[in-house]
Amino acid sequence: MADTVTLPPRLSPVAALFAGTVSDTPAGVTLGARVMDQVQIDCRPDRMAAVALPLPAPGRAVSVDGLRLLSLAPGRWMALSAGTQDLMGMLRERCAGAGAALVDQSHGRATLRVSGARVREVLAGGTGIDLHPRAFAEDRVVSTALYHVPVTIDRRLGTATFDLHLPRGYARSLAERLIATGRQYGVAVGA
């Protein structure tokens, strides 16, 4: 069995940027950072029934018991939790009979939450994905490029809230771009 190492707590890669950014009033777009545990689950299709989780269909997401599951590709999901639970331990239990591979991505990934009345306009300026509610309903997920940054866009509940999951090294650059683009509508930032 592999040795496990406890890593120091994660800090938001955009905290300093947000602290130095003055929020507009009124704000058509609100941008925040979320520190989340993120574990990738890979499982062969013929073993998925042995996973004790409601694995969503391709392009979908599901929330259950404080856990958000995103379908990334056939046989691949991301489990996200903002809670204090031992996500990896819980996933090991629920995936025990499936032979699934679990990879902790928490320190290498960042999550930005973008919401507001004008959020779709800001996001549409950087991607070709149709984000209108008729085309991109609640609990839809897509992996794409947003302002040339690889992201997974997760449409949350409501018509104007999106979580952007991306490699941590790109978080500040994307946040700067979202702030600059959103200024025409007014931007509020928070930790």
Image (cartoon, rainbow, N blue to C red):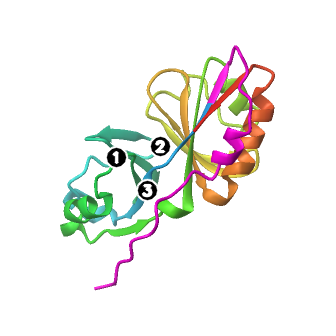
User: Which disc, if any, is residue 38?
Assistant: 3
Residue 150, compared with residue 104, is above or below; it is above
Q: Which residues are magenta?
A: 1-30
Residue 178 placement (x, y as % from top left)? 73, 36
In the figure, is residue 92 to the left or right of 68? left
Furthest-top residue in this view: 26
**Which comes sooner in the sequence, label 1 or label 2?**
2
Residue 107 placement (x, y as % from top left)? 51, 63
Mark 3 vs mark 2: in front: 3
User: Which disc, if any, is residue 83?
Assistant: 1
Name the element at disc 2: loop
Residue 174 placement (x, y as % from top left)? 72, 46
**Which comes sooner in the sequence, label 1 or label 3?**
3
Q: Is residue 17 magenta?
A: yes
In the figure, is residue 18 to the left or right of 32? right
How far is disc 1 from disc 3 in space, using C-alphas? 11 Å
User: Which disc, if any, is residue 59?
Assistant: 2
Q: Is residue 127 magenta?
A: no
Residue 96 placement (x, y as % from top left)? 20, 68
Mark 1 vs mark 3: in front: 1
